[in-house]
Image (cartoon, rainbow, N blue to C red):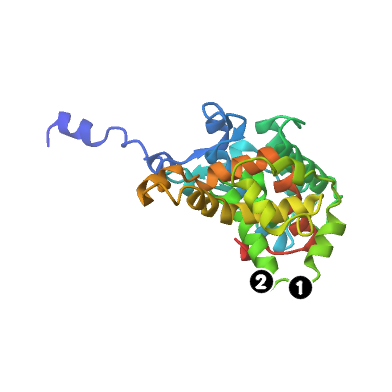
Amino acid sequence: MDGKGSASASGSALPTLDLNALLGRLTLDKHLETENPFDNNKITPFYQRIFRSLIGAISELESRGITRGYLQPHQIMVGGGPCQFVRAWLLPRPEEDNPTAPTFRKQFDSLVRMILGERDLSNLELNNFLHITASAASGGQSLFNFRQLQWHPVLLSSAELPQLVYLVFDHLDMRGTSSWKEDFRQMIQRDVEVRDTVLGVDYFSDVYNLEGPQYYEENALGAFLFSANAISDVNGYIRKAFKQYMTDEEKDNKLMSVEQIFDMLISFFPHMLIDVYDFLVKKGLPIDGVL
C-alpha cells in the first residue's frame, strides 16, 4: 500500500451518529426555542402531549417512592411523530429518591409556569390547572392522585372535551351509586342560571323543555346534566324541525358537529368543564376508567 493510501486509512474516524437526532428527538429546551405553546389561547397539542407524558412519568416515579429530583428542560427528551404520538421522558431516568432535591411536583409546577406563564383569570381552564399544580407543589394536595392531571380539561383535545362530559355522565348514571347527584350538588356548590340561559336558543330549548326545571336545577349539577343531554339530543331536534320539508341529505347539512354543540355549551356555562373535573377528583374516580 502506498503512503497516500496509508494516510487515508489512518485518518480521523467518521463522526459518530447522533441517534437522538437521527430519530427526530430533541431535548425540551430546544423545542422551547421554536415551538409556541399557545394557539388561539389554547395549549397546542404538542405541549399537551408533553405535559401528559411528564405527569405520567412523575406518577410512575411516585408509585415507587421516588418523589424528589430535577425536571429541567435540558433533562427532558421529546420524541415521536405527529402530535398525537409525541411523548416526553426524563434523562437520566431516576432510580432512587434524591432527598436534597425539590419534589417533582414542585419542579413540574415551575416548568409549566415557565412555558405557559402565570395564572390568567380570563382563561378559566388554564387558571384552574395552574391552581392545582401550585397546590400540589406546596403539598396542599398530598393525597391528590397526580396522574389525574393527565385528563385535566386544559390538556384534552377538542374531540375529547365533549367525551369528558358525556361519558362521565353516562358512567355515573349507569354505574354510579344512586347518591351521585347529591354528592355533586354538595361538592360543587355553584349557582348557575340554566333556564334563562338556554330558553330561546333553537334546539337547546327543546332539550331543556323535555325534562324541565324539576330536573335541571339552577346550579352546577343542572348545567352538567343539561350539557350531557344536549350533546346527545340537539341534532335529534334539528332533524325533527326540518322533517316535513327537507330530504335526509338536506337535513344532514343542518346538523351541528359535536364540537359546535360543545362550544355553545361552554359559552352558556363557562365553569362546567372545571366543575365536572373537580367532582371526579374529589370523588377519587379514576378518569381513565371513564374515558
Horizontally, residue 147 falls left or right of residue 262, namely right
- Residue 46, position as x, y percentages in the image: 53, 39
> Depth check: 228 or 153 in front?
228
Say whether residue 15 is visible: yes
Residue that appears at 75% across and 39% down: 130
Q: Amino acid at mark 2?
A: Met
Q: Which mark is residue 6?
A: none
Q: Which quarter of the figure has residue 9?
A: top left
Q: Which quarter of the figure has residue 33?
A: top right
Say whether residue 270 is visible: no
Please say if 191 is above or below 116: below
Residue that appears at 65% across and 32% down: 115
Q: Which mark is residue 177?
A: 1
User: Which residue is tagged 2?
Assistant: 174
Residue that appears at 64% across and 64% down: 170
Horizontally, residue 185 falls left or right of residue 51, namely right
Residue that appears at 53% across and 31% down: 30
Q: Amino acid at mark 1?
A: Thr
**Distance of mark 2 from mark 1, alpha carbons?**
9 Å
Instruction: Give the secondary structure at mark 2.
Output: helix
- Residue 193, position as x, y percentages in the image: 79, 43
Instruction: Give the secondary structure at mark 1.
Output: loop
Q: Name the quarter where the N terminus is drawn.
A: top left
> Depth check: 12 or 205 in front?
205
Question: Outermost residue, front direction?
Answer: 244
Horizontally, residue 62 falls left or right of residue 82, namely right
* Disc 2 crowd, CA 10 A, few/some/many (<14, 14-19, 20+): few
Question: Outermost residue, left direction?
Answer: 1
- Residue 214, position as x, y percentages in the image: 79, 59
- Residue 157, position as x, y percentages in the image: 56, 45
